[in-house]
Image (tube, coloured by chain):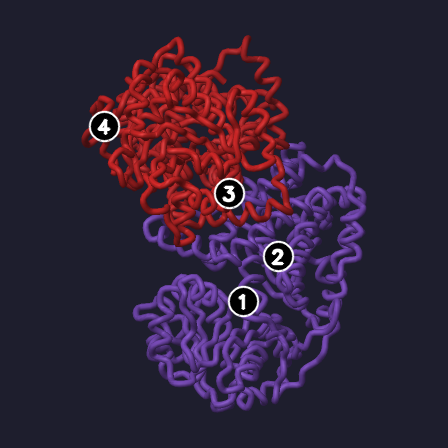
Chain colours: A red, B purple
Amino acid sequence: MTSLTSSVFRTETMTVPGGTETIVRGGRDLFPLLPQALHGVRRIGVIGWGPQGRAQAQNLRDSLAGTDVTVSVGLRPGSSSAEDARQHGFAVGDWLEVAAASDLVILLIADAALAAEHEQIFAVLKPGATIGLSHGFLLGHLKAIGSDFPAGHPVIAVCPKGMGDSVRRLYLQGATINGAGINASIAVHADPDGHATDRALAWSIGLGSPYTFATTLRDEYLSDIVGERAILLGAVHGLVEALYRHFRLDGADPVTAYERSTEAVTGPIARTISTEGLAAVRAATGDQELFDRAYSAAYGPARDLVAEIYDEVADGTELRSVILADKRLATRPMTEIGGSPMWSQSAAVHARRETTEATIDPLTAGLFVATMMAQVDEFAERGHAWSEIVNESIIEAVDSLLPYMHARDVAYMVDNCSRTARLGTRRWGPRFQAAYEQIVLPGLEAPADPTLIKAFLDNPTHEALAAAAVLRPSVDISV
Amino acid sequence: MTSLTSSVFRTETMTVPGGTETIVRGGRDLFPLLPQALHGVRRIGVIGWGPQGRAQAQNLRDSLAGTDVTVSVGLRPGSSSAEDARQHGFAVGDWLEVAAASDLVILLIADAALAAEHEQIFAVLKPGATIGLSHGFLLGHLKAIGSDFPAGHPVIAVCPKGMGDSVRRLYLQGATINGAGINASIAVHADPDGHATDRALAWSIGLGSPYTFATTLRDEYLSDIVGERAILLGAVHGLVEALYRHFRLDGADPVTAYERSTEAVTGPIARTISTEGLAAVRAATGDQELFDRAYSAAYGPARDLVAEIYDEVADGTELRSVILADKRLATRPMTEIGGSPMWSQSAAVHARRETTEATIDPLTAGLFVATMMAQVDEFAERGHAWSEIVNESIIEAVDSLLPYMHARDVAYMVDNCSRTARLGTRRWGPRFQAAYEQIVLPGLEAPADPTLIKAFLDNPTHEALAAAAVLRPSVDISV
């Protein structure tokens, strides 16, 4: 179900290509409504203290301050995070005890732990307690093993479209700038008592989401896992690896090659899309002809890869691979990928930012925008809601992940994201790199394809992105 | 079962690390025994006319000339191969009719066709007709869909350790040089009448195999699919993509970069391993110190990847991916990867062969041999027979595939192998490239790991390879 009705919050209608979507606008003025919307939830147990756990536990506690709703943190015995959670002022308990005592149990442990331990947690839940997730991984896993969520429990998901750190930092900015925060989708997977949607909206608004849109757990899972393997991370990594070497072989010095590839993507390209939209990048390159050739060469191969990723995620093979990898990691720890020659240039490039004007390389821009559009079009073809498409393909990229990579670098991001994302990036990043190197760049000499360019310029995503932008807070992400 | 007993052919004992294996030596002098060993098989139906179908149908027909055993070719209605099969002198029939009329039905259609059509073929088989395969793909597929081979039929596999073209060309050389041919493994998966092993041996000897060793269909499947994704093709492609750019960025001109990477692997490294063994490559580099550092840097990351591939093939995820890809190909045809800048140097490099002495670059050699040993060690750890290990990891590489790539080039091979191999190479080649670029090459400065080098020099595979080499025909492959 992707409709959205609430007995507590005012829904709004957002015009999107081909129709409308119902959304709920957030804001601190709505916090007094949270206890009512939570419908009987008085104890919230956040299980896990990773980036999402830390951010969500704090945001919910702050949003619910002065009410009778409490937020506790549950951790595994001996967890090294317990001290940090206590220092942040939380009552920390054994995860199963906290789960057993809570009316809303928000499961924010790592995917592999969730796969291994969900049965233990399900077994201790209070009758009718709400199961809360922040993405659809567990649904995919339960499906893969022929299992299901326990009957009689509401199952909801609130999925912030950004990293945990951003969820907390933008929330804090929201104290002075109303509406600052990260958009979130909600999914109501099981609703035995009829209040699941309100609870999900309360949770989302309590996290500080500027706007909340509806999806299904399955659509969320697909777009989330595919997105991080494609334009949100995997494709970015593959793209800059390919382009850095391309520019170097073309005679550029290391700093220039870095600036034309990574720096262009994480800096001015992301910023231009964020503030002016996708088509503006084309104009900003100063070489529309090259942009169009690059776009034309890249769109097809990128679309092929996004379709392949989508098939594998939908089929469950990607998830099986993650679980297999997780088993191997016990004896073969994951190596880091930060050794690529490019990353040794990060410091020098970052130091030049104050004195060097950021420019958009037209080749880099053409390849990046084509890949982003490939994901947009694939998601649209597979029937995702437009809010989900633009958030998972564009907004999360240009307003959350790319600015984070701009502050650190791409390799840091790859080596420090969630394990599922990290494994996915290692699987698919090299595929994008190879496609750019072996198919796209050698095809650059061909003239631009006017049909592809017209499809880009007329793409309904521009309208959807503009509709979402109206709801965008007036602050940039703090990284 | 990997023991081997025959009521017709003489078995021999080959000493391998940790014990012995039973093998059967081939030779044209054994052809008069084939009808007896086929135990009631008078009509052989070869279904399919790809490289393996074409080679095996011709070899079997020639080996059985003058006997009452006939070989027919069965093709799908409207097959574009029918004319070629007829020009090669075969009676060509509808595939289901040929399958229905044959006592031994050898299924050599493409994997995807086998996955889609095996039920139709099984349905028309004569009672007790033998089902013949040339690799274990179908077993993996049947397992994946919860199905099985039909009861009451012998199920055997004869798996030549080389491409179809080589199977035919070396067979023809065998007319004057007894023993020339491609080694094969056999697997007896079902043996309701007790004659399955003899039939498999007759088929293998009829193909011209210098020696035949026993495996199981599952082990064959695993080693075959993993091998082509790793050292037989995928890793080679990834390696030369990474090294070509590495040498270019290090200042080498394109021809030199090609010679130090691709040319070294497909030429002198393969030739040295083939004739003198693995350890000889180290000495031949002229820079043992660099070889050792390269080997030490590459072994771990390569082993991680081979283990990952093995897990995915064993789990069935790799096969599911191939089947998903096959469905996509209906609307998204596979692009070719020959556009990498390196391949435009092939002609220039090949032209220099007559005047330039082939040299073994120590860096290239260290990375290649480490990757080969990673596969050997992983297969040994997973319990494969030594004949299978050395054939699937070393002999097939240096005596069949690399010489083929040397004559054409790597990209030609990638774009023209079986669809399962082609898809696998595209999936895993870029993973090897990324591992070499991001982990191995940046780690070159570290000193060599004496434990790894000792494990290489003392590795039992040298003994197994020497035992297999005794049975090696005295001819090089014709490409």
Closest to the observer, A107 or A346:
A107
Q: Mark 2 — residue?
A: B402
Report the chain holding disc 3: A
Residue located beneath label 4 in the image = A6
Q: Mark 4, mark 2: which one is toward the viewer?
A: 4
Q: Which mark is residue A366?
A: none
Give the left or right position of residue B24, taking residue B290 as reference.
Answer: left
* Disc 3/disc 1 C-alpha distance (Å): 29 Å
Q: Vertically, is B224 above or below A274? A: below
In depth, the one of A111 and B332 nearer the eye is: A111
Tag 4 and tag 2 share a subunit: no
Q: Chain of mark 1?
A: B
Q: CA distance from mark 1 to mark 2?
A: 26 Å
- In this figure, which residue is indicated by the disc labeled 3? A112
Question: Where residue A429 sits in the image (x, y, percent)?
Answer: 50, 38
Residues B74 and A335: in front is A335
State the image coordinates of residue A344 (x, y, percent, origin top left): 63, 25
Q: Residues within 10 Å of mark 3 (few under 14, many from 20)?
A: some
Kind of residue at badge 1: Arg
